[in-house]
Amino acid sequence: MGRRSLWESARMSFRSISGSPVRAGLTALGVMIGVASVISLVALGRGAQQEVAGNLQQLGANLLMVYSGEPRGTALVRTNTSNIRPTLTPADLEAIRNIDPELLRLAAPASTANAQLQFENRNAAVTVVGTTPEYTEIRNFRPVYGEFFDHSHVASRSNIVAIGMQVYRDLFDAGTDPLGRTIRINGSAFVVTAVMEEKGAAAQDNSVLIPISTFQRRISGDAAYAMIAVQASEPGIMRELQARIEEHILRLHRMPSMEGADFYVVNQLDLLATVEGVAGTFTLMLASIAGISLIVGGIGIMNIMLVSVTERTREIGVRMALGARRRDITMQFLTEAVLIAVAGGVVGIAIGIAGSWAALRFARIASEVTIPSIVTAFGFSFLVGLFFGGYPAWRASRLNPIEALRYE
């Protein structure tokens, strides 16, 4: 079909649609709702995925956690390791720190225990973390007031403590300077030297950090570590670094393989992949549910176009009598169905983008509209018009011209 014939079909379709704007609008409503739903739900799913990935990044960049004991799922953070028998030794930590610096940036041991804090007449139940100065860099958890302890404090087993923001609120009045104040952890006196940044997670905000040597002496009485936090030099080598860590510790523990080993390594990449997989499946499910509206809208288009064919039977007969071919009639009605669907799709895209923005702006719900989702939604609206308009267009083209002219 030439360009002139296509333009003629489009012109006639516009004239037919503009002649019944309310009916055309109601016909396009199903497609409009379907496209808006797809855009909005995919945006919300994508936003949730980005938010979870961002929260994982807040735990530390390029992070691997080496845990004592047997694997316990894929959690990157163990909020409580007091019930785990420590199996990681100073020799394991030294072996990890001696790995090629092109692979490893930092490593820090850590052990945790539940404890009772007391300041004057106030008490708080917290998690005590024994670690080294590298921990703040690896876990992206830094002091906002005061100074974190250094290696000299670890060497001297100093009774100093950095407290989480929630601990500060529980023990001190607002505006009180906690630095230099003495608090008691399970009865032992510790001097506060820092307040850590607020992370919005109870595991960190409701914790206190002390030198690992002090933890081993005052809290656990064990020279082994519950875990070792490791930061890779870059994301691309995290798998290789994990394999190297497993190899070194297996050799030190005289174990043949990771099967039945007394430690395990959790890789941040595995968690990101799991999160992305779950979020992707969830988003696809939401989009599929919203896509049902597109099918319903398509059925509405087919229904109205069949009615339109019946109403315009005489017109079709006249056009055929004047020389219009079957494909001209097919193109006219098919173009009309596609225009209705695409118009509904365009409006639906605008509504979906506006809804996603409103969710982010007013409800503080993470959402992210992507170009692929817009293109996909527009493409589906076009295909809906093409598919569901096909049968009415074919039916119009199969009318007998003589019978069509006699139709009243």
Image (cartoon, rainbow, N blue to C red):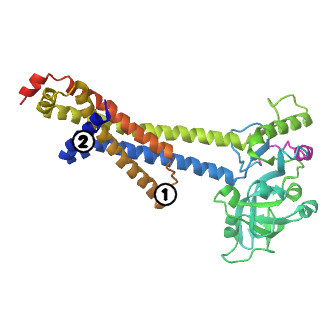
* Residue under the point 53% across and 37% down: 281
Q: Position of residue 79 (x, y in %)?
A: 71, 51
Q: Position of residue 357 (x, y in %)?
A: 46, 56
* Residue under the point 46% across and 61% down: 362
Mark 1 to mark 2: distance in Å?
Answer: 41 Å
In the picture, the disc for residue 141 is: none
Report the amino acid beneath label 1: Leu
Find disc 2 in the rendering and name its residue: 11
Circle 2 SS class: helix
Mark 1 or 2, closer to the camera: 2
* Residue under the point 89% across and 57% down: 213
* Image label count: 2
Find disc 1 in the rendering and name its residue: 360
Residue 295 appears in view: no
Does 286 sit left or right of 59 as displayed?
Answer: left
- Above/below status of 349 relative to 5: below
Q: Could you tell which of marks 1 and 2 lies nearer the N-terminus?
A: 2
Which quadrant of the figure contains the N terminus?
Answer: top left
Q: Position of residue 177 (x, y in %)?
A: 74, 77
* Residue under the point 29% across and 29% down: 390
- Above/below status of 71 relative to 168: above
Report the amino acid beneath label 2: Arg
Disc 2: CA contacts within 10 A as few (<14), some (14-19) or many (>=20): some
Q: Which residues are magenta?
A: 82-97
Which quadrant of the figure contains the C terminus?
Answer: top left
Q: Position of residue 259 (x, y in %)?
A: 79, 29
Q: Is residue 221 magenta?
A: no
Disc 1: CA contacts within 10 A as few (<14), some (14-19) or many (>=20): some
Task: Examine the image and state in which quarter residue 122 appears.
Answer: bottom right
Task: Choose between 137 and 77: the one closer to the eye.
Answer: 137
Does 132 sit left or right of 365 as displayed?
Answer: right
